[in-house]
Image (cartoon, rainbow, N blue to C red):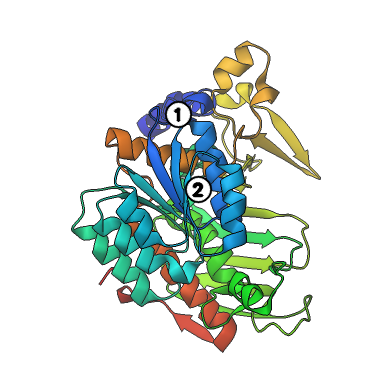
């Protein structure tokens, strides 16, 4: 045990103060090979965000596709060099030089596009959740088995430098043992889209259609459930919850506020809350351990050490922030370099959105053969948990999640 602790003292100092295991933020924000040709399918809000990050990374957006004509016109203005298509099959037939496809359509449309892209021999980045049913998610997973191309699911925590840094501590004496977990996503937004016709309104408001929508647990929770899966190496065995329309009384049938309890195999629980009615606190996850707690908020992260936790030595490099009566150690990559320049506070927070790092990892996997950060298997498991959580809200009671539910077939 003493040898393990001594090794941690050495490694821990390097972890917070430079992260030998993690390159600096600028290294993480790699650029795509010059002229690397890609296409985006779905030019709604997420498709536009993907386009912006691809442009920063130096990829060539050779084509964009959307069945909605106003969005396609808007995409043409944003990505002037790209060919535009309203039909994905036509895009595949006409743009044979494209290497990778980004799937950013509504969730229930992922399957047909992902299957066609894989069959055409393209690398695929598919937004999360993977699909709106387990059947579709498993069909996507099955399609990838016969392909040697990259398939990455858009669960971004696994590419986030702050989360990678926190996870390296989670696995050491600095955290020690998991006690409990909490997460939330709070935003003030209606999920309604402006449209000139009722037909277009219905198409754009797919998240409010109970026949295809996974609601807050699926569309938002899936991303945060995957954080817990990644850190703990566990998946929930049952979920209970409730929700309702408490804010947007506009005839919708999909809850605008949900509360969930996800129980894990060893008895620890994740308390999860999401709402469209209030933005206080935003999006974060908290993991409580015996020696510390982590609060992870996507662009920032903090470690809160317990008073009786041993001093490890790296604290001398730490930047600290007050949270009422608690003091958090800010999780900063490249802290040693910044501290030597008296610029430690400059490293607080990521310079890019999490999406940037996820896309960068995908492009690096495509061009350099590096193992994908979030493959289809983890995407399917997170999606399965999101589906079960939505069922708990809609049906009430306790929804069991079996090992078979998490299998690809």
Could you tell me if residue 172 is visible in this image? no
Q: Residue at x 65, y 67 (%)?
A: 273
* Residue furthest to the top: 341
Local packing at callout 2 (Cα closer than 10 Å; few below 14, some 14-19, many 20+) is: many
Could you tell me if residue 409 is visible in this image? yes
Q: Which residue is mark 1?
A: 31
- Residue 255 is left or right of residue 369, and the answer is right
Q: Quadrant of residue 257?
A: bottom right
* Residue furthest to the right: 324
Q: Identify the element where label 1 is drawn.
A: loop
The quadrant of the rendering that contains the N terminus is: top left
- In-front residue for pair 86/392: 86
Q: Earlier in the sequence, mark 1 or mark 2?
A: 1
Q: Residue at x 77, y 81 (%)?
A: 250
- In-front residue for pair 304/18: 18
**Residue 182, percent across and down?**
61, 60
**Residue 302, percent across and down?**
64, 40
Q: Which residue is mark 2?
A: 157
Local packing at callout 1 (Cα closer than 10 Å; few below 14, some 14-19, many 20+) is: some
**Residue 141, percent across and down?**
29, 64
Q: Residue at x 32, y 65 (%)?
A: 140
Which label sits on residue 16? none
Say if 285 sits above or below 23 in the image. below
Say if 194 sits above or below 285 in the image. below
């Amino acid at each position: 045990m003493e040898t393990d602790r001594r090794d941690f003292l050495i490694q821990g100092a390097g972890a917070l103060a430079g992260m030998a295991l993690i390159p600096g933020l600028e290294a993480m924000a790699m650029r795509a090979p010059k002229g690397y040709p890609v296409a985006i399918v779905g030019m709604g809000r997420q498709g536009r965000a993907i386009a912006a990050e691809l442009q920063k990374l130096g990829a060539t957006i050779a084509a964009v596709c959307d069945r909605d004509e106003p969005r396609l016109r808007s995409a043409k203005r944003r990505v002037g060099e790209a060919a535009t298509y309203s039909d994905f099959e036509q895009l595949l037939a006409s743009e044979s030089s494209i290497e990778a496809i980004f799937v950013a359509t509504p969730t229930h449309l992922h399957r047909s596009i992902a299957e066609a892209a894989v069959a055409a021999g393209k690398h695929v980045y598919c937004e999360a959740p993977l699909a709106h049913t387990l059947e579709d998610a498993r069909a996507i997973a099955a399609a990838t088995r016969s392909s040697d191309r990259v398939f990455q699911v858009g669960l971004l925590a696994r590419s986030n430098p702050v989360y990678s840094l926190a996870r390296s501590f989670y696995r050491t004496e600095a955290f020690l043992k998991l006690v409990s977990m909490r997460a939330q996503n709070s935003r003030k937004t209606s999920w309604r889209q402006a449209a000139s016709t009722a037909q277009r309104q219905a198409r754009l408001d797919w998240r409010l259609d109970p026949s295809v929508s996974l609601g807050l647990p699926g569309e938002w929770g899936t991303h945060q459930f995957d954080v817990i899966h990644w850190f703990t190496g566990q998946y929930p065995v049952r979920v209970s919850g409730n929700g309702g329309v408490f804010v947007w009384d506009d005839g919708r049938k999909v809850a605008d506020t949900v509360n969930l309890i996800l129980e894990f195999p060893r008895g620890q629980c994740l308390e999860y809350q999401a709402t469209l009615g209030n933005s206080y606190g935003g999006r974060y996850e908290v993991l409580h351990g015996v020696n510390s707690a982590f609060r992870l908020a996507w662009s920032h992260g903090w470690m809160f050490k317990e008073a009786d936790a041993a001093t490890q030595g790296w604290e001398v490099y730490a930047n600290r922030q007050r949270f009422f009566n608690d003091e958090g150690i800010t999780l900063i990559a490249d802290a040693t370099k910044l501290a030597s320049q008296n610029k430690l506070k400059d490293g607080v927070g990521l310079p890019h959105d999490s999406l940037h790092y996820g896309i960068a990892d995908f492009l690096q996997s495509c061009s350099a053969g590096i193992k994908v950060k979030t493959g289809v298997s983890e995407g399917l498991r997170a999606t399965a948990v999101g589906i079960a959580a939505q069922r708990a809200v809609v049906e009430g009671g306790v929804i069991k999640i079996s090992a078979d539910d998490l299998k690809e077939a």
